Image: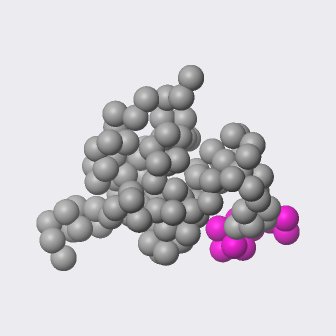
Amino acid sequence: MDRRDRRSAAPSSARPGRRALVAPDLTALHGPTTGTAVLPHRLFWQADRRVDLDNPHLLRWMYETVLREAGTLDELRTWLDGPTLVRLWPELFLPRALRAAWEERHPALRTAVPVG
């Protein structure tokens, strides 16, 4: 494990008692950006787990949910899209430690400009 991997594995939390999971490479994130996504029960615990990604508010909500709840890198790769994450980043409501962990690993997120 190189020094950057150890740093991203630091005990910053997505929520109390849980480490932040950070994708090592934004270009590896190829999740859906349009249409309807059906989140797995592990990520969203409702009976109806369909998300209309063409609704900007629901797309943002799904990204917040996946960033907080994902337990594996495969979940991040499956449900997040790198360019979309960068575009939405300034608008996402995330725990401070989770935001800091992602921004430490991906400085481009710190400089992302909100979409008007």
Give the camera-side residue of 35 and 95: 35
Residue 17 is situated, as x and y percent measured from the top left of the image, at 46, 65
Magenta region, residue range: 40-48
Say which quarter of the image contains residue 50: bottom right
Which is nearer the eye, 13 or 52? Answer: 52
Provide residue 38's location: percent of width, then percent of height: 74, 67
13 part of magenta stretch: no
Q: Position of residue 107 (x, y in %)?
A: 28, 44
What secondary structure is the stretch in magenta mostly built from? Answer: loop
Name the spot of residue 103 as percent of width and height, x first: 33, 46
The residue drawn where x is 54% and y is 59% is 80
Query: For the N terminus, which image quadrant?
Result: bottom left
Residue 31 seen: yes
In-image side of 20 versus 94 (left or right): left
Q: Does residue 45 belong to the magenta stretch?
A: yes
Comparing 33 with 1, the one in front is 33
Residue 91 appears in which quarter of the rendering?
top right
> From the image, which quarter does the C terminus lie in?
top right
